[in-house]
Amino acid sequence: MKDFYDVVIVGGGHNGLVAASYLAGAGLSTLVLEQQGHTGGAAVSQQVFPGVDARLSRYSYLVSLLPDKIVADLGLSLELRSRSVASYTPVRRDGRDLGLMVERPEGATTRESFAALTGSDSEYEAWTAFYGSVASLAGVVAPTLLEPLASAAELRKQVDPALWEALVERPFGEVVERLFTDDTVRGVVATDSVIGTFAGLHDESLIQNRCFLYHLIGNGTGEWRVPVGGMGAVTDALAASARRAGASLVVDASVTSVDADGTRAAVTWIGGDGERSVDCSYVLANVAPATLAALRGHPVVDKPEGSQLKINLLLSRLPRLRSGDDPARAFAGTFHIDEDYSQLETAYRSAADGSLPLVPPSEVYCHSLTDPSILSPALVASGHQTLTVFGVHFPARLFASDNDTARTESVRRVLAGLESYLAEPLEPCIARDADGNLCIEAKTPLDIEESVGMPGGHIFHGDLQWPWADDETEAGRWGVETDVANLLICGSGARRGGAVSGIAGHNAAMAVLELRP
């Protein structure tokens, strides 16, 4: 440990590791301080259930926004696999059990599935036209994410004006209601606007629009891929890259203060050998803005609020579906539960009024169908599978008075929703751990805050921002700046943060290299 570093990075999550790799690779002495006993933050693979050899992506679980350029620049040993199915939505309608199947790439089966549900080809044609236009916007925005901020006016010139108005200037619910008529189809489109974002579809703040955009622009395609080996494989590769570049990574280091005056800075932390402090030229904060404010001794004005329920399960086998569709196909993509458009809005209103949604929308994903390597050979041979459930519209406020009771009831409601589309009870399909307990783990926003330090359990560290400059004064900057020149945000709270992308880490590193004499 030295007394002085060019750069100290507070937080060893994926963005901090990306920044460390670039900066150390450029010859700057770089120190990363991580509070937990391992790097990776929320992007980790862990053995969750006692005596069960399954390493689950405990918090974050899929990859879309990580640019291929970062993977190539850092020489990451990483495999991201495409899923054969984009999504499947079970539907009970007019006494029939159906399923809306969206393949990847879309083909005849997808068109036939739309027609079977809606009675015509019109919804599928509206679907393809809409996502074709969204792809054109993604193609414009994605290449700018690793560059200084472009202005909104500059990007708008390159996009169809009607599309820009619909996605950037008007509440997202308006375009969904205008283009689609079927409640289920509307919901499948709308769900990407409320993942990790507590908002109604007509919210005037447009945070739902920003969330939708981030879900569709990754690498210009918006495809969400499966990291082979789980999310921990992503951050393990990044940690290896940072070490190769010469960065020093220190875990079990709880940072207690950050001081920066524009020229010099100091970071203090408590580790295994007591309190330590180090001077540096730059500090990169890979923590939420609210956390950084507290570390600087500033008042935390607006603490973010997470809004999701994360449930991890291990099954001894996949359950059969009422629709008769093959579960190995249905669960291979994103499996939507009670996410009709009207159900999303009803759940939001209920949660906004302070009550757990009676019929909570959620979505399920089975990592092991695409990548069985996270399971031991014995579990694979016996047919075990993982399920990751992401519950929508579960804001932290609903768990504030009694987290344990609210968690138990929330899990019961979410799993009851899943079971309502099954041809058999769910519980007999759930594996048991070495102690005989069902392999179910649930994390509320409060649990996530306690486990990985995200204020309010907000998975984006706060509301997502547009990935461009709001005005010309911000254009040309990197979107990572604070009120002090040598203190930068390199985490999800940066302008182009959010999700497992490494974009904020890259951009903060570029800002330092631009500032450094």
Image: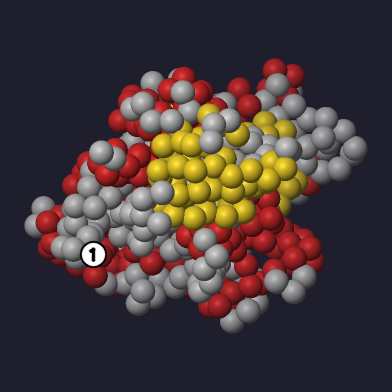
**Colour setup of the view:** secondary structure
> What residue appears at the point 34 percent right and 36 percent down from the top-left corner?
67
Quarter of image, res 406 = bottom right
Residue 288: percent from left, percent from top: 50, 56
Which of 276 and 417 lies nearest the eye of the viewer? 276
**Residue sitting at x 40%, y 71%:** 201
Pick the front one: 364 or 69: 69
**Residue farthest to the right, as pictured:** 435
Image quarter of the C terminus: top left
Name the amino acid type tagged 1. Answer: Asp
Horizontal side of 159 relative to 108 (left or right) equals: left
329 shown above or below 244: below
Task: Please give the residue where the numbered disc 1 appears in the rendered image.
Answer: 470
Q: Quadrant of residue 252?
A: top right
Counting from the top left corner in percent of width and height, residue 119 is at 36, 57
* Residue 188 visible in the current orientation: no
Say whether residue 56 is left or right of residue 352: right
Image: 474 above or below 492: below
Q: Residues within 10 Å of mark 1 (few under 14, many from 20)?
A: some
Image spot of residue 378 (x, y percent):
74, 19
Q: Position of residue 380 (x, y in %)?
A: 68, 22
Q: Nearer the viewer, residue 233 or 75?
A: 75
Question: Residue at image x 70%, y 69%?
Answer: 399
Which residue is found at the position 59% from the left and 48% from the top? 268
